Image (spheres, rainbow, N blue to C red):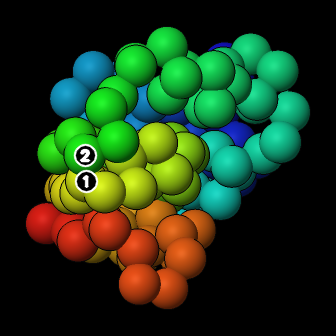
């Protein structure tokens, strides 16, 4: 997959951002990960259904990013809880925006 427009594969040799191993995707460019065309390749809904979560499950979503999967996981466990965790707090903010008010998804950084 090519990097988003304006993002290089290696955004500065000393930075922690980039597309290579050990790097994190820049939160400033994270909305590009929510592109509806991405669902043609990787459907969050189908992926979560395949997980076969029980309605009361407790789920830890590590590396939640901008929340591609978060709303679908939260819907799959209406009596459970989904804990969002990411190394970038800005990603958690984006993921929380995708969830409804009063959601069953607290967060960790």
Residue shown at 34%/28% (left/top)?
53
Q: Give the left or right position of residue 32, taking residue 70 as reference.
A: right
Spot occupied by residue 57 in the image (x, y as percentages of width and height): 22, 41
Q: Residues within 10 Å of mark 1 (few under 14, many from 20)?
A: some
Task: Tell me the crowding category of disc 2: few under 14, some 14 to 19, or many 20 or more residues within 10 angstroms, Cα based.
Answer: few
The image quadrant that residue 41 belongs to is: top right
Give the secondary structure at mark 1. Answer: loop
Q: Position of residue 32 (x, y in %)?
A: 70, 50
User: Where, quadrant-wise, is the N terminus in this rendering?
Assistant: top right
Q: Where 46 sits versus 33, above or below?
A: above
**Observer-nearest residue: 97 or 14?**
97
Residue 4, how many percent across, how many down?
70, 42
Quarter of the picture containing the C terminus is bottom left
Q: Tell whether 109 sits left or right of 105.
A: left
Residue of label 1: 80
For marks 1 and 2, the one nearer the N-term is 2
Residue occupied by mark 2: 56
- For image coordinates 25% across by 53% down, the residue present is 80
Residue in the foreground of this view, choosing between 13 and 42: 42
Q: Report which quarter residue 13 is drawn in.
A: top left
Horizontal and vertical percent for residue 99?
52, 70
Q: Nearer the viewer, residue 54 or 100?
A: 54
**Residue 88 shows in this picture:** no
Answer above or below: position of 103 versus 74. below
For the image, the number of numbered tags is 2
Give the SS element for disc 2: loop
106 lies left or right of 2: left
Does the CB distance between marks 1 and 2 fall below 8 Å?
A: yes
Image point (30%, 66%), residue name: 105
Query: Is residue 61 in sight in this rendering?
Result: yes
């Amino acid at each position: 997959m090519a990097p988003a427009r304006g993002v290089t594969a290696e955004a500065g040799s000393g930075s922690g951002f980039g597309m290579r191993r050990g790097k994190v995707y820049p939160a400033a460019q994270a909305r590009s990960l929510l592109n509806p065309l991405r669902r043609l390749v990787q459907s969050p809904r189908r992926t979560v259904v395949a997980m076969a979560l029980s309605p009361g499950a407790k789920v830890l979503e590590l590396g939640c990013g901008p929340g591609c999967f978060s709303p679908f996981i939260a819907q799959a466990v209406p009596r459970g809880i989904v804990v969002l965790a990411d190394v970038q707090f800005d990603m958690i903010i984006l993921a929380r925006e995708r969830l409804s008010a009063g959601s069953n998804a607290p967060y960790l950084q």
